[in-house]
Amino acid sequence: MISSLDNKTQPSTNSFNKRPRPTAKLKLNVNIRPFEDKSIIVAQNSTSSYLIQNHPTITDLSESVSSSKYIFKKVFFGDNYESKNSENFSHLGNHFYIIQKSNGKEMQDTYKTKTVTGFHSLSFFAVYDGHSTQTIAEMLANKLDDYIMEGLHENKDISTSIKEAFIKIENEVAAMLGEWRPRGGSTALCGVIYDGNLYVANLGDSRAVMFQNENYKALSNLHDFTNEDERLYVENKGGIVLNNRLEGELAVSRSIGDIRYKHLMNKEPEIMVHQIHENDQYLILGTDGFWNGLDPEQTLNMIKTLKEKIGEDKLGLKEMGDNLIEEACLNIKTKKDNMTLIIINMKGIMMK
């Protein structure tokens, strides 16, 4: 079973945790021109999200980012932010729906969506689940997709672009954490629709599942210690797994950050390639908090029930997502985790 503890790491009595932690300065979309450039359009959806259009380096770009912990006072080249309380959040986009459900504590999940048209036409969706800090998840939401696009602009193939982007952000996180080496990291689950294929890149225990009429297909493996291959990898490196946690603390076997354990962990994102088929209906990306309440089989059955009750042609993504996340919450009786869910209408995305 997947752990349903609130955080991926347990508290440690190590004295180094008492040292002051460095203040991270986040910069959104560092490759773009200053905010004063009037060709850039920024629309504030709410206190926890914004939309960006007319990216100066990519034609006809729109993207949305969740920032549940921080309100950015400066969207571009901004170092100043203020904390805000955790809250539930939802956003209905073109052919996708995002919903976040707070467990009442700090929301450490973030997400990112992006659509790009032009020479490198793609759709990008991702969920990031931070543990012990939200800073690293924020960095992933701010930068990882831009690094993937950089690789494509350099005429690298999509898989190489994804792998190099993960390496780049990992190195950036390690440099930010530096000698303090605090606990904390983030899972990363990205779905990139490109040239008729879906590329799913995963580090951690979030899940990507493709739902068809009567079936579903898992497009990611769990990177935790219920996965025997992941356990063996860590143990062969000299790691000790106690209660399905690395050194009794870390519940995931792959992540961004967690540099105290990085010498024991597999750093490579696992990439699965799915050739998009006409039977594909919904792609769901969810952090482990959601899948702790509904497994893929239960999710499929609930989608079928909603179709029968409401009508397949009338069932909207928002109604589907709200019902799914409500049911997941009801199924978890103790130690509820934050939940982030992205549901993508595959037929709509492919026709855009």
Image: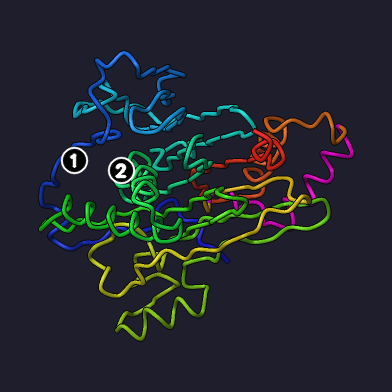
Label whose residue precedes the other's in the sequence (1 or 2): 1
Q: Secondary structure at mark 2?
A: helix
Q: Secondary structure at mark 1?
A: loop
Q: 310 and 195: which one is in front?
A: 195
Query: Disc 1 vs disc 2: Cβ atoms closer than 8 Å?
Result: yes
The mark found on residue 262 in the picture is: none
**In the image, what residue type sits under mark 2?**
Met
Q: Is residue 138 above or below residue 210?
A: above
Q: Quadrant of the C terminus?
A: top right
**Left or right position of 298 against 132:** right
Q: Residue at x 51, y 34 (%)?
A: 117
Residue 79: image location, x then y, percent: 19, 29
* Residue occupied by mark 1: 24
Is 19 part of what is drawn in magenta? no
* Residue occupied by mark 2: 139
Q: Is residue 170 above or below residue 139?
A: below
> Badge 1: how crowded within 10 Å, few (<14), some, or many (20+)?
few
**Left or right position of 89 against 242:** right
**Furthest-bottom residue in this view:** 236
- Give the magenta range: 289-310
> Badge 2: how crowded within 10 Å, few (<14), some, or many (20+)?
many
Q: Residue at x 40, y 20 (%)?
A: 47
Residue 201: image location, x then y, percent: 48, 58
Q: Quadrant of the N terminus?
A: bottom right
Q: Residue at x 38, y 67 (%)?
A: 268
Q: Nearer the viewer, mark 1 or mark 2?
A: 2
Is 304 part of what is drawn in magenta? yes
Residue 242: image location, x then y, percent: 39, 76
Q: Residue at x 68, y 43 (%)?
A: 346
**Left or right position of 322 against 162:** right
Residue 78: image location, x then y, percent: 21, 27
